[in-house]
Amino acid sequence: MRTALFTASYNRPDLFLEVLKGLEQNEDDLENIDVYHYIDGGAESKQQELLAHIKESKLEHQEIILREENYGVGRNLIGARRDLYDKLGYDRVILVEDDLVPGPNFIKTSLNLADWARQYDDIGMTQVWNLPKENVTENHLHLVEATHTHSVTYCMDVEVWNEIKETLYDYEAKYLTGVSYQKKKWRAIRRKFMKPRYVTQRPTRQGKLLLPQGYEYPPPFGPRLKRTVPTSQDAITSLALWQKGFARIATLAPRARLKGEFGVHCTPEIFENLGLNNQGEYVWEQSVPTEFALA
């Protein structure tokens, strides 16, 4: 499969340097993967510092995309996927955001999990990072769970993207184009865009399914859309996947560490409340699984 990996960065060169160093640990596993870097623009972007880190890195890359203006994280991510899937024709794409530091087996596990999940028609997204959990050991490396956790990294096949992309493009055209991402009309997004599309019962897909009937997998935003429901492009991606009957799965054992205490969607208080101050520095000794199972 033609596979691309892209990073999305803005304004955090110190964290991004750690991300690059983490990817360098996976250099051998990246041999057949094309790497792209999407750097957002604007007065506060620190583009040149980010660019310098990429040029100094040992990590080979296919292309660096410098946004000429501030796209905001939503347009930057949607635009990157449009490029990689629609224009360049990749079969699958891995995202790594600029505050997610990969561990030594990050890429190999990402690929193995994505390969394994392809047999199931109800899995739309795979990821090898998860919120911290107690008592995760090497005995849990092969276990996955259905999740709605943060999309700071994931792998998605083009077949899934083709089913959900029109929802993302519609959202982009109506609410992100020509406006600051921070000033998007979140009330209108929630009321006019999300509410008509939201169902609490995930549609059942045809074919071979991973999640058995009765598996506890609640809707991504609860039984109804509250006024606190996020309206980010991550939220719209989750909505589009759910609307099409897809589930997201993540390994119980994280193969990366999230360090973005300060960011567009995070503050030190949120970071602490999510338990992210208690992430382990995992370096798993045993071989990377090729087969996985629901926890």
Image (cartoon, helix red, strand yellow):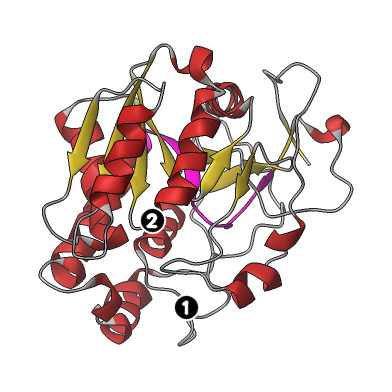
Q: Nearer the viewer, residue 27 or 21?
A: 21
* Residue that appears at 49% across and 52% down: 151
**Of the residues under marks 2 and 1, which one precedes in the sequence?**
1
Give residue 240's position: percent from left, percent from top. 37, 56
Q: Secondary structure at mark 2?
A: helix
Quadrant (top left/top right/bottom left/bottom right) for the C terminus: top right
**Location of residue 216 in the rendering, given as x and y in whole percent from the top left corner:** 71, 57
Identity of the residue drawn at 63% across and 25% down: 105
Amino acid bearing label 1: Val
Q: Quadrant of the N terminus?
A: top left
As helix, strand or loop, the secondary structure at mark 1 comes to: loop
- Considering only vertical position in the picture, is 220 above or below 39? below
Q: Nearer the viewer, residue 102 or 114?
A: 102
Return the x and y of residue 72 as percentages of the image width and height: 26, 62
Amino acid bearing label 2? Thr
In the image, residue 217 above or below residue 81:
below
Residue 74 place in picture, x, y as percent: 29, 60
Foreground of the two, 107 or 170: 107
Name the disc covering residue 290, or none: none
* Crowd rating for badge 2 (residues with CA inside 10 Å; few <14, some 14–19, many 20+): some
Magenta stretch: give its range. Answer: 145-160
- Residue on which the image places disc 2: 237
Q: CA distance from mark 2 to mark 1?
A: 14 Å
Q: Which residue is mark 1?
A: 229
Name which residue lies at 19% across and 72% down.
175
Using a 10 Å C-alpha cutoff, classify the residue at mark 1 as few (fewer than 14 neighbours), some (14 to 19) or many (20 or more): some
